[in-house]
Image: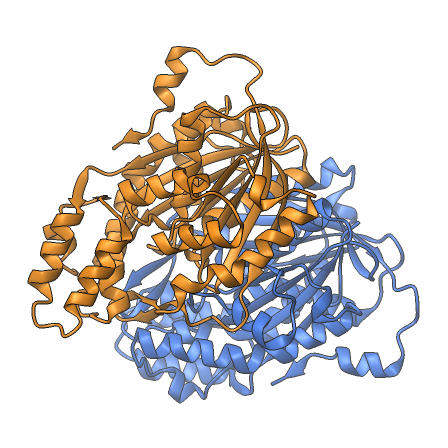
Chain colours: A orange, B blue
């Protein structure tokens, strides 16, 4: 059965704190009638720090869609390879062992996608299947895991590499000042994450089943307005309430496995915001601590879009508390509103990891 | 085993002929030093007619990236649903039977993708998995078939719907006048195509195996330059020569099934241009007539990007000449340079099709 191995995650070097974010919001939007609300919303996110690919002073300047998108490619080429190498190492595989390369990014657009560049420059086989996904937003982390799982179900000896590359700071639109945008400006961060799904062998989360759910008629709750200045992120005020609508699908999935949501051993979910984690605990009748890894990602990195699920999973691995067969769920949430959900059990490593591996497995900061 | 059912294809109402294209090129680029070459290249395409979503006079006006992309969504919402209904009918399924919706389009960008709109408006189940692909260009038609095949291999009772929506005329960039662009302006057309891959049951091409191949170090041969004015298609002069590099991968795939490329009963390949079809016949030691359906698509509709493979396949079904177990290949080619290839055998319908079905199966013109 398919096993989702230990992820590798890198966050870039430029750090912006909650205090700096609040100061910036006050300075840039001093005359905004809803500034107090925006500041309160940002404070409520609990995002203490975020990491950006460039200094915040530079990130605030919009050089045009063309230059922005070119920066995205440039930063991706710098930041993705070490994370990919680390993820391959974590799975005890080389690039030559990978049969499917899923690359998800909603913050830059390229054709051909980065999959072609990675294959050409990192030693992947020319017959590696390429699956770039640009349009599932934050849900793409979960979707990538699930499509990798499906692929390894079809080909039990295959391996899939997932890469999530999200530089949300390159989507900053200085002329947008709706309340959803002001909140987003204080919420999103940059990160690169990668993980391997092995069709056979490997240690980590043995994937049992997956499912997708589209909350009916919520297409415009999270969306991009595509403009000459690039992609403009639009966030509806109803989004924080979506977990009430998604939870039944999560409960159905858990029930299909004859498990109980209140007795899960782990949960790795997209930390879009604090309300999502709070509400999930309520609607799944689960302790808030179940979502501690997702909350830690939100606090330390912000909402890092499709990379969030993989970073929360990295923290679960680092905690190293699960026993053989421990039961849990993974879920990405994003535009649609779409939930990409999975169930898995903990599959411990057969051989013990030595200290050199441990060192290598730490999150890389590039 | 997975069966690729009869596709449905629609081309829009506004027709532009080769003669009109040549007149336009002469009028718009009268002073271009390479005009004679451009005219010769366009003539060599053999594209007799193309169908556009708007009159050519309007298509020549660039209203800005935002307006263009909004038009793409508007035309997609008008043109895609009847094609989807026809493809479902061809597979003897309803929207409720579909488990995976693969939507490929490289000529417009939306987040959430059209998958969410289709699920909400056409009666698909909210748990339909969504797989939007925007970055594989013309290869996406083949990739969609192959990922649907993989999915139905993992879940043998599942069904996948493929939709390819390409309005290439909305990518026209009036300020670009490189020779590759002038050629492309006379080559690409608009179309919508859809087909179902059934995990069990159904008539059509029983999918045996698939493979992908990236021609090393050709990333910049077919690409988009992402600019404030949208996606600018860039075509390298070496692209027509790629089949010599792709053919070994096609031969390997055929050999893996212990078949012979010179004895295939059908071939449905992306008709990027006439040279591709000529060279494939040479490199696969196959008769040029093997590619007659792809050539017909090119002649009547132009290069319709990811929809090309599905339209050529529609023509194969319409010809109705294959016997039980006939052997053939499908292949999409696109940026990367990427080839997405598949082998299949003909699986005839168990029950005879009555005249009403025949009528319904004709290509819809919307």
**In the depicted structure, whether residue A281 falls above or below residue B99:** above
x then y, percent, for residue B81: 61, 78
- The residue nearer to you, when weighing A225 against B5, is A225
The answer to which image quadrant residue A329 occupies is top right
Front one among B296 and A256: A256
In the rendered view of the protein, which quadrant contains the C terminus of chain B? bottom right
Residue A30's spot in the image, x, y percent? 7, 67
Does residue B320 appear left or right of residue B97 in this picture?
right
Q: Is residue A352 left or right of residue B298?
A: left
- Image location (x, y in percent) of residue B223: 39, 56
User: Residue furthest toward the right?
Assistant: B351
At 67% from the left and 48% from the top, the residue drawn is A255
Task: Give residue A97's position: percent from left, percent from top.
Answer: 54, 28
Residue depicted at x 25% and y 77%: B31
Q: Is residue A206 above or below residue B110?
A: above
Along the horizontal axis of the image, is B328 left or right of A259? Answer: right
B291 or A246, which is in the foreground?
A246
The answer to whether residue B228 is visible is no
Relative to A365, residue A219 above or below: below
Residue B35 visible in the picture: yes
């Amino acid at each position: 059965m398919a096993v989702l191995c230990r992820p590798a995650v890198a966050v870039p070097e430029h750090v912006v704190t909650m205090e700096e974010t609040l100061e910036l919001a006050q300075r840039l939007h001093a005359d905004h009638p809803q500034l107090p609300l925006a500041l309160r919303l940002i404070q409520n996110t609990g995002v203490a720090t975020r990491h950006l690919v460039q200094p915040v002073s530079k990130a605030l300047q919009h050089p045009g869609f063309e230059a922005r998108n070119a920066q995205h490619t440039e930063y991706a080429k710098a930041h993705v390879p070490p994370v990919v190498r680390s993820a391959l190492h974590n799975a005890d595989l080389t690039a030559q062992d990978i049969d499917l390369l899923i690359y998800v990014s909603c913050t830059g657009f390229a054709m051909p996608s980065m999959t072609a560049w990675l294959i050409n420059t990192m030693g992947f086989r020319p017959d590696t299947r390429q699956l770039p996904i640009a349009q599932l937003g934050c849900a793409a982390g979960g979707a990538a895991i699930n499509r990798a799982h499906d692929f390894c179900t079809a080909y039990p000896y295959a391996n899939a590499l997932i890469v999530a590359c999200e530089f949300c700071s390159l989507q900053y639109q200085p002329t947008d000042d709706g309340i959803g945008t002001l909140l987003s400006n204080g919420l999103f961060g940059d990160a690169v994450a990668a993980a391997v799904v092995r069709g056979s062998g490997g240690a980590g989360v043995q994937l049992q089943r997956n499912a997708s759910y589209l909350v009916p008629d919520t297409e415009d709750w999270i969306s991009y307005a595509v403009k000459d200045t690039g992609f403009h992120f639009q966030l509806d005020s109803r989004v924080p309430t979506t977990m009430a609508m998604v939870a039944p699908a999560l409960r159905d999935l858990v029930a299909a496995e004859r498990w109980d949501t209140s007795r899960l051993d782990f949960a790795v979910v997209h930390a879009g915001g604090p309300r999502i984690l709070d509400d999930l605990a309520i609607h799944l009748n689960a302790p808030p601590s179940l979502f501690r890894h997702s909350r830690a990602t939100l606090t330390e990195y912000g909402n890092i879009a499709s990379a969030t699920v993989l970073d929360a999973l990295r923290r679960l691995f680092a905690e190293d508390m699960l026993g053989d067969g421990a039961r849990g769920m993974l879920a990405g949430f994003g535009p649609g509103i779409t939930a990409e959900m999975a169930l898995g059990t903990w599959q411990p490593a057969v051989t013990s990891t030595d200290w050199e591996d441990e060192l290598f497995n730490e999150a890389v900061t590039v």
